[in-house]
Amino acid sequence: MGFYTTFVANLLFPFQEKLKHHNTVAIRRSMDDSQWWTAEMLEQYRVKRLRELLIRAGKDVPYYRDCFSGINFDPQSVDSIDDMLILPFLTKSIIRSEGERMKSETAGKLARFNTGGSSGEPLIFYIGNERVSHDVAAKWRATRWWNVDIGDPEIVVWGSPIELGTQDRFRTIRDWMMRTELLSAFEMSESRLDAFVERIRTRRPAMLFGYPSAITHIAAHATERKTALNALGIKVVFVTSERLYDHQRQMIAKTFGCPVANGYGSRDAGFIAHECPAGKMHITAEDVIVEIVNEQGNPQPPGVSGEIVVTHLATADFPFIRYRTGDVAMLGTEICSCGRNLPVLEDIQGRTTDFVVAANGTIIHGLALIYVLRDLPEVREFKVIQESIDLTRVMLVAGQNFSAETEHRIVVGLQKRLGESVRIVVQLVDRILPEKSGKFRYIISHVAKGN
């Protein structure tokens, strides 16, 4: 670790977290120790934190207070993970319908978040400082597994408006001091890809971070241009937010000359699992309890696939208890050779996000279209299908107050991204059916891409 990285990781970043009233540094240091605990020690710690979460939820959160009362559940009596299996699952529809009743009555300032979800169903939820501190600490710990740290030069290829829409002067200065540079994953035109490749060559970052689809796209473009990126000193490429396919891992690793570290999680469920250098996806077990259930909601043993259900232990301000993610995976059957006793998640079939092509040929990340729809309270569910370069169809389930004005806003918003000449057809439906695989896709493009 160089002098400047040491300064950022040990002084500058901790100072920033202190100003934000986050306990990130202390939590990460604790996690550095707990990853080596015995399975028995880890389980005792998890049960203690689960009991504390349930006690706070039952006392301070209206929804859970009524829920626990209705089934005569006493959080004080919890002395094993299995004791919470009597509780009902939490779903997106419950969060939507309960609204403010999901918030703790003792919560301080909460940050509002929203996500499209795997089916395109908009979801609004809230996160407090406790949750943020734990999530950042979990990501930080996993970053350090790969011999890189906060303060090492980093390029982030991302598409969230939370990050891209808030690049004010303060954040620009902060990112410069942290040696982090943000590139937009929304536009992947030839000229933009050329600029991305050149920026990576010039910057020579220690690590890349972003969507696997976006980074694969950059890698494919560099290969097509015969531009070598495998001797820049990049130590690792972190990918998350989409399913990482084998061909993507191979292309990224070959192009950048370094390993690829996968991460699984979401804004709502948190940072669930991270890949270690030995190749296993370790669950952030200190913060997250993962259940695998079948279609009937029954727990499945290690080695059997099912839906991922998450309980995040740092969410007392807005509890996520037995939250159904809609994704499929299975718990591992073997302890990882790295020596960490954190449980392993395998065969993750998570969210996938497609690219679409604008009328002028620009390749755009599918999230650019999702953000047009997901924040509209008049829209309950949606799926965007790009039938051709000239026609995009939007299937949606209308919510309250849906009107011709709402439809006009959708058409205008999509045309701004795809081109004014593109015909946008809004189709109102009662229900959006899943794919044959059982998974939902909220962006589908039938237009061939350049790479």
Image (tube, helix red, strand yellow):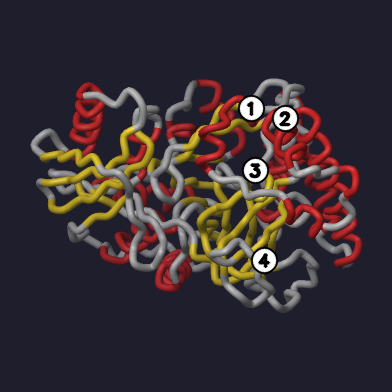
Does residue 410 appear left or right of residue 162 in this picture?
A: left
- Label number found at residue 151: 3
Residues 47 and 190: in front is: 47
Q: Earlier in the sequence, mark 3 or mark 1?
A: 1
Residue in front for this viewpoint, 209 or 378:
378
Q: Nearer the viewer, residue 48 or 96?
A: 96
- Could you tell me which residue is drawn at 39 percent across and 56 percent down? 440
Q: What whole-number distance in Å separates the C-alpha atoms at marks 3 and 1?
A: 40 Å
Q: Secondary structure at mark 3?
A: loop
Q: Can the viewer see residue 441?
A: yes
What SS does tag 2 mark? loop
* Residue 428 position within the rendered picture, expressed as x and y whole percent measured from the top left: 23, 40
Residue 203 locus on image (x, y percent): 47, 47
Q: Is residue 334 above or below residue 312?
A: below
Q: Residue at x 43, y 49 (%)?
A: 202
Residue of label 2:
61
Q: Could you say which disc has been placed on residue 299 in the image?
A: 4
